[in-house]
Image (cartoon, rainbow, N blue to C red):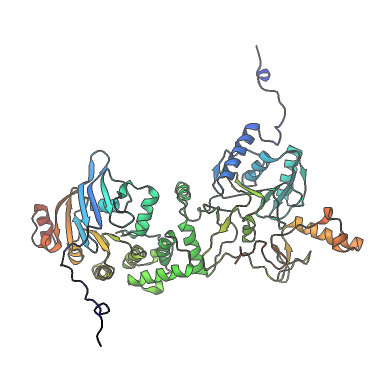
């Protein structure tokens, strides 16, 4: 019996291996943020992040890395700069120029964030599962059972012990609080995950566990991630690319291994060697 | 040389309906604005009155701004017409405006009420004024009132849903009794004043105009006639009114009206319908029927007709499908 060539399963077309197949998911140009007249927290920073990539931002305290993250999360308005997000409904629109409601939509549906301080990201006196449910409620979900299931699923994904899902975060340990934040951030499957020193303040063993979870989640979901840390170990473990910041400027950037093994900038050299 | 007494306007005692003309005009304008934006809290300058804040000054100001000599006024306090507060307010309004008073909900044109909506369905020519202690439905979830205003502006009511979610998680049911938040005209969430859940559906597509006014908080808002009012509920956990099935009023023998529970010595309880004006009418109808020995059809309707109620004798709400 001869099968016609039309019915035969065709082999998948082999594409030429390209390192970057699509335009960057996130593009920021000329970002400037000043506080008062003489504090320049962020000075002409450009950022590009590709889909599925993990971008690390390192720098000492006061280098402007957390401010960058707050700006990316649309919590503050920059003094200058453009911010483009390559998703169908937002292409070609500067996110900084959107109105409050549109920005809130972007923050709800497209961005998840984990803060160093869980008080910033969580309602400490509400239940943990409620913290996650709130995001879905804001997104328009109105069925109790769906909320409950989604909260359970997100908490399970971030390896939170489910028998404590209805405890308020004030009664949880630091590591658990970070897991609740992480579950909240990924509950709506965002395009961009922002991590602001997610493991600082945790003891080393818990830090390793949370980092494991982060790494696994990132690999499974392929979410574009920007992680800010002063801890080079964290960056080395998670980031594909790294940006080094000082005094609000980017002093060096490149592939993580390259930058950390062979730092070119004097400050980066100092930073790498200062690691205990 | 003129004296101060000569320069001052002649003393005419009080203005009509106690409030001065400026106050009444301001209130009427605020009321119009409130009607134009259903559920939106309009700030107003709450005037001093001869009763203390918290005793119905908000409701009283609205009533005084609206009342005319042809009006028939009824004042309700937790369902009763005869409590001290209701009696005093009624007497005050009647004295200041020359209006007629009644305890019959269907005869009144202007009803000021605290915590209850009458059992009989109100009609298009009637206005219900509710006294509100706390107009802000977001107060329990956001104590900063400026932030709460912003949340109203953005229709950001996620926190209210979150509080319902948590009640279900912690207690397996919604524990809100009075002041159940509801969405008016698909836009603003309002607190319907501390009426029981039983009364909340009565606001939905009602024929009458409802005005809610908080004197201490200086805010008033409105539910215009035939406006959608939906209590917040989950798709799979519907809103429920108080479960009083099996309770029988000891005065009228009726069921499925909102009841007061009267504890008895020995541990038991008897129940009576909370709306005393309604009870009065039902009892009068019964006594008339006994006196004349006639069938209900022969009784003169003008005197004892008990109007259609929001909930029928089986407890079904008059709008099909509204309560699931």
In the image, residue B123 sits, relative to residue B245, either above or below, namely above
Residue placed most toward the observer, A195 or B56: A195
Q: Quadrant of residue B324?
A: bottom right
Residue placed most toward the observer, A275 or A44: A44
Residue B219 showing in the rendered view: no
Name of the residue lying farthest toward the top: B1
What is the x, y in percent for residue B78? 68, 55
Q: How many marks?
A: 0
Name of the residue lying farthest toward the bottom: A1
Q: Residue at x 18, y 71 (%)?
A: A14
Q: Residue at x 80, y 60 (%)?
A: B282
What is the x, y in percent for residue A177? 34, 65
Q: Is residue B287 left or right of residue B138?
A: right
Q: Quadrant of residue A49?
A: bottom left
What is the x, y in percent for residue A4? 25, 80
Q: Residue at x 26, y 77 (%)?
A: A6
Q: Quadrant of residue B23?
A: top right
What is the x, y in percent for residue B125? 71, 47
Residue placed most toward the observer, B84 or A190: A190
The N terminus of chain A, quarter of image: bottom left
Q: Is residue A244 left or right of residue A83?
A: left
In the image, residue A176 sits, relative to residue B32, either above or below, namely below
The C terminus of chain A, quarter of image: bottom left
């Amino acid at each position: 019996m001869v099968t016609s060539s039309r019915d035969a399963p065709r082999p998948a077309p082999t594409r030429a291996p390209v390192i970057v197949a699509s335009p960057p998911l996130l593009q920021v140009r000329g970002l400037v943020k000043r506080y008062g007249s003489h504090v320049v927290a962020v000075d002409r920073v450009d950022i590009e992040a590709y889909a599925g990539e993990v971008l690390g931002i390192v720098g000492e305290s006061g280098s402007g890395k957390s401010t960058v993250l707050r700006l990316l999360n649309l919590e503050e308005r920059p003094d200058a700069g453009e911010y483009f997000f390559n998703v169908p409904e937002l292409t070609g629109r500067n996110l900084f120029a959107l109105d409050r409601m549109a920005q809130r939509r972007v923050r709800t549906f497209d961005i998840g964030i984990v803060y160093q301080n869980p008080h910033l990201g969580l309602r400490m006196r509400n239940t943990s599962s409620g913290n996650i449910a709130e995001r879905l409620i804001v997104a328009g979900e109105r069925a109790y059972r769906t909320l409950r299931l989604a909260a359970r699923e997100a908490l399970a994904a971030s390896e939170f012990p489910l028998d404590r899902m209805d405890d308020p975060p004030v009664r949880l340990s630091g590591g658990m609080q970070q897991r609740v934040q992480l579950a909240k951030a990924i509950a709506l499957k965002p395009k961009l995950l922002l991590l602001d020193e997610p493991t600082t303040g945790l003891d080393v063993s818990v830090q390793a566990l949370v980092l494991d979870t982060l790494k696994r989640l990132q690999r499974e979901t392929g979410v574009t991630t920007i992680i800010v840390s002063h801890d080079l170990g964290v960056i080395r473990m998670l980031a594909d690319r790294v940006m080094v910041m000082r005094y609000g400027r980017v002093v060096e950037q490149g592939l993580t291994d390259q930058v950390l093994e062979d730092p070119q900038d004097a400050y980066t050299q100092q930073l790498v060697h200062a690691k205990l | 040389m003129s004296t101060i007494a000569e320069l001052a306007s002649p003393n005419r005692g009080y203005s009509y309906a106690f409030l001065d003309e400026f106050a009444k005009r301001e209130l009427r304008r605020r009321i119009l604005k409130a009607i134009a934006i259903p559920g939106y809290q309009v700030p107003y300058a709450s005037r001093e009155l001869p009763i203390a804040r918290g005793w119905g000054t908000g409701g009283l100001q609205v009533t005084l701004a609206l009342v005319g000599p042809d009006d028939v006024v009824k004042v309700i306090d937790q369902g009763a017409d005869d409590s001290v507060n209701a009696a005093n307010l009624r007497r005050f309004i009647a004295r200041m405006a020359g209006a007629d008073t009644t305890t019959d909900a269907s005869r009144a044109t202007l009803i000021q009420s605290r915590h209850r909506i009458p059992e009989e369905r109100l009609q298009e020519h009637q206005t219900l004024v509710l006294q509100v202690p706390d107009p802000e439905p977001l107060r329990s979830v956001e104590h900063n009132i400026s932030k709460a205003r912003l949340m109203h502006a953005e229709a950001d009511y996620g926190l209210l849903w979150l509080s319902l979610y948590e009640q279900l998680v912690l207690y397996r049911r919604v524990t809100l009794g009075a002041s159940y938040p509801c969405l008016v005209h698909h836009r603003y969430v309002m607190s319907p004043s501390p009426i029981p859940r039983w009364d909340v559906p009565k606001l939905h597509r009602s024929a009458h105009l409802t005005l809610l006014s908080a004197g201490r908080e200086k805010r008033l808002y409105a539910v215009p006639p035939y406006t959608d009012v939906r209590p917040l509920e989950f798709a799979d956990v519907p809103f429920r009114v108080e479960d009083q099935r099996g309770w029988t009023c000891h005065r009228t023998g009726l069921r499925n009206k909102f009841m007061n529970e009267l504890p008895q010595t020995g541990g038991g309880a008897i129940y009576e319908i909370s709306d005393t004006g309604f009870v009065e009418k039902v009892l009068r109808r019964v006594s008339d029927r006994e006196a004349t020995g006639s069938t209900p059809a022969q009784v003169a309707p003008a005197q004892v007709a008990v109007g259609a109620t929001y909930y029928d004798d089986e407890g079904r709400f008059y709008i099909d499908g509204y309560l699931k």
